[in-house]
Amino acid sequence: MKGPTIDPLDHPQLIPLLRAAREEAGSLRHPHVGAEHLLLALTRHPLAPTKEWERRHLAPAAVRNAVLNGVRKGANTPSDPATLPVTSRARKALASAARADHPGPESLLAALGQERHGIVARVLRTSANEPQAGRPVGPRGRPGPLPTTAPTPPGGQRAENGGSSDGEPSRWLALRAAPLLAIPGSLVAVWTHQSPLLVFVLSAVAIVPVAGYMGEATEHLAARTGPTMGGFLNATFGNAAELIIGIAALRAGLVELVKASVIGSILGNLLLILGLSLLAAGANRPVLRFNRTAAGMSAAMMTLAVMGLAFPALFHALHPGAAAAERHLSEGVALILALTYILSLVFSLKTHRRLFGGGGHAEGLGGWSVAKSVAVLASATAVIAVESELLVHAVEPMSASVGLATGFVGLIVIPLVGNAAEHATAVLAARKGQMDLALNIAMGSSTQIALFVTPVLVFVGIALGQGMNLAFAPFEVLTLGLATVVVAIITLDGESHWFEGVQLLAVYAMIAVAVFFI
């Protein structure tokens, strides 16, 4: 039996969807509700049309990103989104859904699938071939204050056969696994007392793919646990590789190396990853658009982090002999930064999730089981811990043998090792037009390192009896502050282009040159 012949706008099963669509239109400052707003509402509906998504091989979050990247924000915010008029195309889709045997999200998505023109038709035709970007995030998909999407590992969306829905060729899988041979290679190099340079290179190469698998396992685990727990997992394991390398360096007493690697990781995410992403995305798009609310919050959080690092540095300059007071000041600031980060997760994952465009996470076809995800995560953590020890102990002799300053290795080389998989994910997402995802990876990871990883390393230093504090060198604090200002200027308007990516890369290159000669 067909649904009752009533106004589709008043159909009881469709009213919640229409209300959500009006909210979507209001958040985009649009004066009406169109088919694209109905599609956006479906990507976040509690009773998601799971069967219809799967039948069409679509990831809701990828669909959402594609729609948001394809529409412009309006100029004026509607005074009351609940009264926004409905376009004829949207009314037609609602009427078709109302006539179905079981009106609701499934029938509405099926009705929208009949579109032949416009952004909805384009998105539903192409999103099946895009990698999913669905769980809440943060940086590497992990949440920092930007937990709206998670990065797809460099292989793309998983399919049931373990490959990718993009038709990922087997040679790419082999290429991705090839660096894993560096794991036994690094162990053999240590046992046979090979040169520190060889040990360093093999350990660095080994960490790169393992960090990628760690991020992938976290993504699958987060997809199984829901947004809140997924956000917590991402916050915990998001920058685990950098954290493990930092702990290994602290165990070896290389405090200055740890400080340099922290600043280097933040700069690499802010300037290198974001710059490459803008360059990749802008190669075939004149204007790039992304969530300005998320960008603004990240810029504010990074400014807070810079202030947190500046106060101990200023205290050290004014009171160079007050080591005990300096240590206590660093501990207090680290605690404040960590608490602020935790509250930022509550804000962006729970109380104000709508501001960031986040919705339900996409659980792709063929997702890993919890047991497999945990096993991969545990194995990857153990491997990175071992390789980090080898890497750290090879740093000083390797630096001496090739004539590189330890500061350059810490600020430039080690961050590239820990973030390599993340770099590839962000650039791949940007190339496919998913600028919100790329921005989340770059800026969200930076805030997580500054407000979560750094405080953790301070407290780990206390536990290990090492003098880890937040009194960073003036050059490091200054470069971080300038990088934050440059990124804020570029991102706060919610639009960008490829040349701004070139500008970010130029800033990063100048910093690298300066560090090389310091």
Image: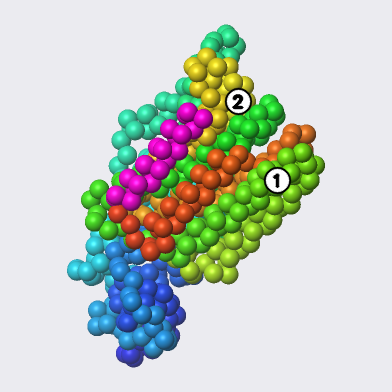
The residue indicated by pointer 1 is 318
The residue carrying pointer 2 sits among few (fewer than 14), some (14 to 19) or many (20 or more) residues within 10 Å by Cα, namely many
**The furthest residue to the front:** 318
Q: Is residue 219 left or right of residue 105?
A: right
**Residue 453 coordinates in the image, percent (x, y):** 62, 45
Give the residue type at disc 1. Leu
Q: Are marks 2 and 1 in contact (CB under 8 Å)?
A: no
Q: Which residues are magenta?
A: 498-518
The answer to whether residue 267 is magenta is no
Query: Which residue is located at x 55 percent, y 40 percent?
Result: 475
Q: Earlier in the sequence, mark 2 or mark 1?
A: 1
The answer to whether residue 502 is magenta is yes
Q: Give SS at disc 2.
A: helix
The residue indicated by pointer 2 is 392
Query: Which residue is located at x 49 percent, y 69 percent?
Result: 354
Q: CA distance from mark 2 to mark 1?
A: 32 Å
Give the residue type at disc 2. Val
